[in-house]
Image: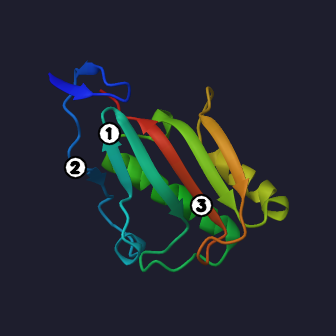
Amino acid sequence: MTPRLIANGAAQILKEPIMSKRDAVFPANRHALYEEHRYSAAIRSGDLLFVSGQVGSRDDGSPEPDFADQVRRAFANLKAVLAAAGCSFDDVVDVTTFHTDPETQFETIMEVRNEEIGDAPYPNWTAVGVNWLAGFDFEIKAIARIPA
């Protein structure tokens, strides 16, 4: 066990060692955006997986032109990252989605979402309208609990 100084100056004994380096997770077929923009697909921390925003990109990093297909591909990219860490969408506890035009996109997003998320109980979900997603119109990020 490692003692660690916390904010109020008291020592706390940790049951797990302090993570000294990021534990990055990538799917087998990484798309070009990870290298181009220098980010990890996900970071494992203890029993949690923090998945970066996944967009509907093709293998070369370009956006899928059809909006519904872009949303489906974003979910497929998310599933690939989850699988690389031994997770599935059933392990997801929190989701944030970003939408460039929520009012006109919402029906399509909900249709695809309902195909993808499985049965209740559902994860937390926050939807955010944005005005720019680097050429994409939908992005999904998640936090999952890694199964024991």
Which residue position is annotated with label 1? 45
- The residue closer to the viewer here, 85 or 108, is 85
Instruction: Pick out the residue farthest to the right.
Output: 103
Q: Residue at x 37, y 30 (%)?
A: 7
Label pair 3/2, CB-CB below 8 angstroms:
no
Marks 3, 2: nearer the viewer: 2
For residue 139, which numbered disc appears in the image? 3
User: Can you give x and y, in whole percent of width and height, for residue 126 in the image?
Assistant: 67, 44
Label pair 2/1, CB-CB below 8 angstroms:
no
Q: Residue at x 56, y 77 (%)?
A: 63
For residue 21, which numbered disc appears in the image? 2
**Which amino acid, mark 1?**
Ser
- Within-10-Å neighbours for mark 2: few <14, some 14–19, many 20+: few
- Within-10-Å neighbours for mark 1: few <14, some 14–19, many 20+: some
Q: Which secondary structure lies at badge 2?
A: loop
Q: Is 50 placed left or right of 20 in the picture?
A: right
Mark 1 to mark 3 CA distance (whole Å)? 22 Å
